[in-house]
């Protein structure tokens, strides 16, 4: 849960007025000691505003997720390597690691299903 900027400012102001130790301020404002410590460390470096959340990286490096969604709709029992190959064909050659595609599928809420005939055949 994100904490408010107002709470951060109140904690920093109270520390500046020497109203207690970091531990006392953490208890008073109902935040963790680590939070108070991090806010003070950032304030000493001149950063009083919250840091921007997230990595800021687009899923699949900016490739339209609809392309992956279409691939799954066409064949939802393909392997991650097959999806990587087909995605590269459709997007101009950019190849993605299977683990990257796995995370993208999870984020998109897309489930892959195993081929029933392959399951009945048993191990190779």
Image (spheres, rainbow, N blue to C red):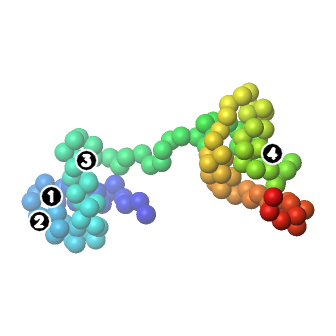
Mark in the foreground, 4 or 1: 4
From the viewer's perspective, is 58 left or right of 69? left
Which residue corresponds to the image point at 16% horizontal and 69% vertical from the top-left?
24
The extreme front residue here reads: 124
User: Residue 71, which numbered label?
Assistant: 4
Which residue corresponds to the image point at 78% horizontal and 32% vertical from the top-left?
89
User: Residue 120, which numbered label?
Assistant: none
Residue density around tag 3, few if under 14, some if 14–19, many if 20 or more, within 10 Å: some
User: Residue 20, which numbered label?
Assistant: 2
Choose the circle earlier in sequence order: 3 or 2: 2
Q: CA distance from mark 2 to mark 4?
A: 59 Å
Q: CA distance from mark 3 to mark 2?
A: 19 Å
Label 2: element kind: loop
Label 3: element kind: helix
- Residue 5 pos. (x, y %): 34, 54
Report if the CB atoms under discs 2 and 1 are less than 8 Å apart.
yes
Residue 42 in view here:
yes
Report if the CB atoms under discs 3 and 2 are less than 8 Å apart.
no
The extreme right residue here reads: 117
Q: Quadrant of residue 88?
A: top right
Label 4: element kind: helix
Q: CA distance from mark 3 to mark 4?
A: 45 Å
Report if the CB atoms under discs 4 and 1 are less than 8 Å apart.
no
Mark in the foreground, 1 or 3: 3
The extreme top residue here reads: 92
Q: What residue does disc 1 label?
A: 15
Choose the circle earlier in sequence order: 3 or 4: 3
76 to 1, vertically: above or below: above
């Amino acid at each position: 849960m994100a904490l408010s900027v107002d709470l951060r400012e109140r904690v920093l102001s109270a520390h500046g007025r020497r109203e207690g130790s970091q531990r006392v301020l953490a208890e008073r404002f109902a935040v963790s000691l680590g939070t108070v410590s991090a806010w003070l460390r950032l304030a000493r470096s001149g950063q009083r505003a919250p840091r921007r959340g997230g990595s800021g990286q687009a899923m699949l490096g900016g490739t339209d997720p609809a392309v992956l969604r279409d691939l799954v709709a066409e064949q939802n029992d393909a392997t991650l390597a097959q999806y990587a190959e087909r995605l590269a064909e459709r997007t101009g050659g950019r190849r993605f690691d299977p683990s990257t595609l796995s995370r993208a599928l999870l984020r998109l809420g897309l489930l892959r299903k195993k081929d029933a005939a392959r399951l009945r055949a048993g191990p190779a």
